[in-house]
Amino acid sequence: MRVRPWAIIAAILSAILAGVDVREGGRIAERVRSAVAGLPIEVRGQVLKITVSIGVALLQAGDLRTAIQKADEALYQAKALGRDQVTVAPNPEPFPQVFQQRIFI
């Protein structure tokens, strides 16, 4: 397989985090984004710049399908805003609280 420098490589990662609030979920996602973006990737002598966009969403009442949909929407918003960033889906709860589970893609 031939890899061209302008090739776009994408991966989708899902993770469920228990016992974190909205801010902490966003901070964890940002640490992941920053760590991956900082990795030097060399292909045929050329270093490629990697960008990472992550969408974060709340898993409510065990509704995984809706959580994945909202995380996906947040991911596409991050891409639309310029890529290489974390976007958190709107939280329907009016006040920050600790949630049982969080999911991000």
Image (cartoon, rainbow, N blue to C red):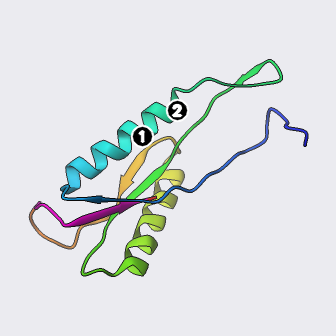
Please provide percent x and percent y for residue 37: 52, 32
Res 4 → quadrant: top right
Q: Which residues are magenta?
A: 96-104
- Outermost residue on the top side: it is 45
Residue shown at the point (46%, 58%) measured from the top left = 105
- Res 105 label: none
Kindly identify which numbered label has been placed on residue 37.
Answer: 2
Q: Which residue is mark 1?
A: 32
At 34% from the left and 64% from the top, the residue drawn is: 57
The image shows residue 4, relative to residue 88, as above or below, that is: above
Q: What amino acid does circle 1 point to?
A: Val
* Residue at x 50% of width, y 41% of height: 84
Crowding at label 1, few (<14), some or many (≥20) Cα neighbours within 10 Å? some
Q: From the viewer's perspective, is 52 left or right of 102?
A: right
Residue 30 occupies quadrant? top left
- The residue at the point 36 percent across, 37 percent down is 31
79 or 40: nearer the viewer: 40
Q: Residues within 10 Å of mark 2 (few under 14, many from 20)?
A: some
103 drawn magenta: yes
| CA distance for labels 2 and 1 | 8 Å
- Determine whether, in the image, residue 86 is placed left or right of residue 27: right
Residue closer to the observer: 26 or 2: 2
The x and y percentages for residue 3 are 85, 37
